[in-house]
Amino acid sequence: MDLNNLNSDPIVVVGGGFGGLATVQTLLAKSDGTPVILIDEGNRFLFKPLLYELLSGELQLWEVAPEYSDLALELGFIFLQEYVVEIDEIEQKLITSSEIEITYSQLVISTGVTTDYSLLENLEDYACGFANLNDFRIIKKLITKINNSTESTNPIVIAGAGPTGVELACKISDLIKDRIQIYLVDKGDKILPNCKSFNREKAIDAIGKRNIRVYLDYYIKSVNKTFLELSSTDNGTNNFIKIDYSTLLWTAGLKPSKLKFEYHFLNQNEKIKVNEFMQIDEYPNIFFVGDITYNEKSPFPSSAQVAMQQGSLVAQNIISLRQGNARKPFKFEDLGEMLSLGVGNASITGYGITLAGPLAFKIRRFAYLMRMPGFLLSFKSSGSCLFSKKIINHLFSQSL
């Protein structure tokens, strides 16, 4: 599809994460012939829940991070590798980094979140997150370096005992074969505080079997190149721990990817307050999706599952808006949760089952691969999983 020969003002989606792509896919599935443009700075969609399997080599790059250009060719949308520098809500126009001006009929903003390094002075100089392919490459090099070294190394410290921190700790521990101790630090009094109890119990078991030490009710007070200081949350005068560390991985906070054109939409919490239809009342042709949003009357968690459901709903509301039909409010449907707990191991609560172990790992991977954007990619990825790993035999020979 040629950007210069459009038959009408397009629907534009800014941000190609879970919410953005779900919007694009639903729009195209219910297409009325209106062109759909996706704008993203990167060249690949990143299926973040499977980034741990990319780290361990259990999945390949094309399965976890397909190129937008391939998805665009299959699904039929226009992809622009750009970033948006300005939006004129009145004229319904936007300008990209290469000075492309696009007049839109409807606009969807789904720019997502990034690692928040603002919580500690100079943190970005010493820490690495786990939110993108660049973070993945840094951690992959770290694992290779550890496995190729015969020297003892100071511990790896992971800040944040939510899903990312716990999953990363278990996966890295398996990949370095417990050569180095991993410290998992969280200011709360338990790991995975917002997760299902079954998954939390299985995660505690998984951590207990690995060279992982957990510091709960502690936060990182300061950090430099060689050591960091933990402080207890009870504010006691002697509750400090100094740790000589090798690597600091930061999973203790995310923040919206602040872009210049978003400043006037964000509130003091750097979120966009939306109504039940995922809009702000001033601009009915602009919709918002994903972790950048919140609704006071009906709060929802920040997750890929939420973003995908929002994206699908927003696409349907755009179609309804164009046809003069009533819009539908967003209602989150909790489909359960799945955790990666090391190489070949996982825990699942949802889909009508509670299950942990190697079979849960196979089901988790298959379920995620089936959700990959694009029929051909989803079919190829899930087919590879089915036939190369013989998951069908496991599913029918073992009891759930």
Image: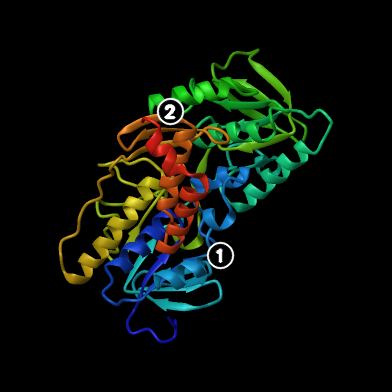
Figure quadrant of the N terminus: bottom left
Residue drawn at 46 percent across, 48 percent down: 386
- Give x and y (percent) for residue 202: 47, 24
Figure quadrant of the C terminus: top left
| Mark 2 crowdedness (10 Å alpha carbons): few <14, some 14-19, many ≥20 | many
Nearer to us in this view, 303 or 341: 341
Specify whether residue 263 is in view: no
**Secondary structure beneath disc 2?**
helix
Sooner in the amino-acid sequence: mark 1 or mark 2? 1
Q: Is residue 126 above or below residue 13?
A: above
- Give x and y (percent) for residue 29: 30, 66
Specify whether residue 117 is in view: yes
**Which amino acid is tagged 2?**
Asn
**Secondary structure beneath disc 1?**
loop
- Give x and y (percent) for residue 159: 59, 32
Residue behind mark 1: 43
Residue positioned most to the left: 325
Q: Nearer the viewer, mark 1 or mark 2?
A: 2
Is residue 360 shown left or right of residue 153? left
Residue drawn at 46 percent across, 63 percent down: 261
| Mark 1 crowdedness (10 Å alpha carbons): few <14, some 14-19, many ≥20 | some
Nearer to us in this view, 148 or 16: 148
Residue 11 figure quarter: bottom left
Residue behind mark 2: 199
- Give x and y (percent) for residue 230: 65, 23
